[in-house]
Amino acid sequence: MSVASSLAASPYITTDPSKACLSVVLVGQLEESLDENPKSIEDFLKTLPHWQEDGKNHVIINLIQNNKGRDMFDGIDTGKAMLVQSTAVYSNFRPKFDIIVPPSMGKAEGDVWEELPMISPIRRNYFLSFWGQFRDMGSQNKIQNEESDKIKGKLSKELSWEADSVVVSALKDIHHHYDVDNRTLLMNLSCDSVGSGAINGEWSICGTDLQRKDLLIKSTFSLILAPANTSYVSSTVFQLRLYESLKHGAVPVILGDYVELPFSDALDWMKAVIILPKARAPELYLILRTYTDNSIAELKQMGRYYFETYFGTSRRIINTVLAILRTRLSMPARPIQDVPSLILLTSVKIQPLANDTDTESKTEDVLGPIEPPFPSMKFKQNFTQHVIYESFSKVGYPFELFPYTPFEKVLPLEAQYKGSDYGFQPIGRGLGGTGKEFSKGLGGNLPKEQFTIVMLTYDRNVKLISALQILKGLPFLNKIIVVWNNPAPPSTILELPEIGVPIKVLKMSKNSLNNRFLPFDIIETEAVLSIDDDVYLRHEEIVFAFRQDDVLNLDVTYRDEKKEGVGVTRNSANLYYSYMYTYVMPQAIRDKVDEYINCEDIAMNFLVTHITRRPPLKVHSSKQFRKYL
């Protein structure tokens, strides 16, 4: 039911066959009848209303946990339908067409972070571990052996063992020469409790789920041996070992470069696992020793991201399958949702300021031009294929389309003069200059842009008006959005000042500090500055933040008089991170912000650092440096 409910919840689902481009078929419920009559699946498929003769434009999904370990569709005519499953034989599998998926071992939906151990320490008790028992051809049941006889290129019992005998010999030598204290390596090549599911010529899993978990959370690297029976490109046991290694934070080391990894035509697996041919088994230990802590941490972090995003629940597996199908058809993802804005108040008259207008500080010649508001360009790379492909292997959220991202590549400097002149403001119109010319635009290889200020307030009219007036004449400002967190409406005597840009006061459904990072539908710029109504920043500080490509924290709060502890506050960032904060970041973090009525700025800083692997910038005024530092 979890797979069916995941499909039903998809935004791409339709019950109208005339509107659908693909028909999805779930076959897991036919597993019990497979032993008696495998032909029943083929008969079932032919009775589907839109199967016609060859099943074209059909996707057959099998996410059951097949304890027989064999390809459910071996010997069955599935026509031109795409197969989605964990086990596949070489003779049936069609690369770039069929999809290998991880086993559906987790819950139906929801966050999985509570089930996962910490990535640190990077190096654990065991440097390398393996636990398994080889299962040769003769140990399989009659049905599997009969089916294996039909597989072209089937290995014999002797050949299947011989294929891994070199590996076993190498592992024993490694253990003998490099693990003198029996603490660095753990190599168990037999076990008392053998799990089911291994195919002919494969290493069975050993022990219980808890026993394997206990081993993996103590292991830096986890060895996974590809089936010696090369008639299979993927098996349930192989995928289960990979699933458990990623879940428990051990870097998978795969010996055997002929297997198919899950979602391989979308994920860059070289970022999360180590793959070596079996012929390199004697060198395995020395190769792994060359990996630095930094490299191991990168592998662990990407492995954790792959697990959480693509493996953790049935819904995420289904979402990934649908995302791959959509990508193959060159279809962009569904646009991510904006938060509707309920406007309470708006500035009545918007009159752009002239260059000689008296502002809070006459900084136009120093900081930048005062221009009429204009929006940022949205959805610029909807069909850019390499960007879509890279989104699967980059920390983020590939299942929906963002209007802006902070990852767009910067053009070469000369592009603004040769064929790419849209929106650029060359310094001094290409003649260069000093600070005055530089300040009149962003200059360089970035097109012209503006930013939006989101100001959080509750019920402090005087402070709010004062904070708004200070922003009069601020260069590059598009509009100001005031987030009214008070359940009661603002006073009727509240009159918004005229500062040259629109001011919108928005009503919130509840009083929450998370509201400051909501991606409102009236935000028209890529850059957003989030501040409180009692924060007073100089124009040069704000413009400096606007020119950076990092999250910038402009105001610092001190709460410990003796130690002068610093709290991270007031973020300047890309609107992309507001979408991530609202829709992708675990709900538990937003709940904790509501519980403490605090720390939303810290949550945002950690989110951005998690995505970019870069720290935020903290900026103090010269007065703060003298006083506190």
Image (tube, helix red, strand yellow):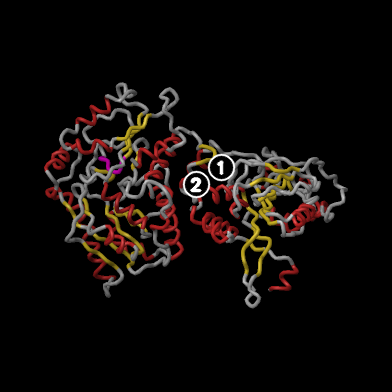
Is the C-beta separation of discs 2 and 1 under 8 Å? yes
**Identity, as a three-letter code, of the amino acid under mark 2:** Tyr
Residue 544 lies left or right of residue 184; in this view the side is right
Q: Is residue 478 left or right of residue 595?
A: right
Q: Main secondary structure of the magenta part?
A: strand
The quadrant where residue 62 appears = top left
Q: Position of residue 12 (x, y in %)?
A: 45, 34
Label placed on residue 498: none
Residue range of the region highlighted in magenta in the rendering: 85-89
Rendered position, 84 above or below 515: above
Q: Total number of numbered labels?
A: 2
Question: Callout 1: 10 Å neighbours few (<14), some, many (20+)?
Answer: many
The residue carrying mark 1 is: 402
Tell me where residue 175 appears, x and y as whole percent: 25, 68
On screen, residue 442 versus residue 595, left or right, reads right
Callout 2 secondary element? loop
In which quadrant is the N terminus drawn? top left
| Mark nearer the N terminus (2 vs 1) | 2
Query: Per the image, is 389 magenta?
Result: no
**Residue beneath label 2, please?**
397
Helix, strand or loop under label 1: loop
Residue found 74% across the figure and 68% down from its top: 622
Residue closest to the eye, 111 or 199: 111
Label 1 sits on what residue type? Phe
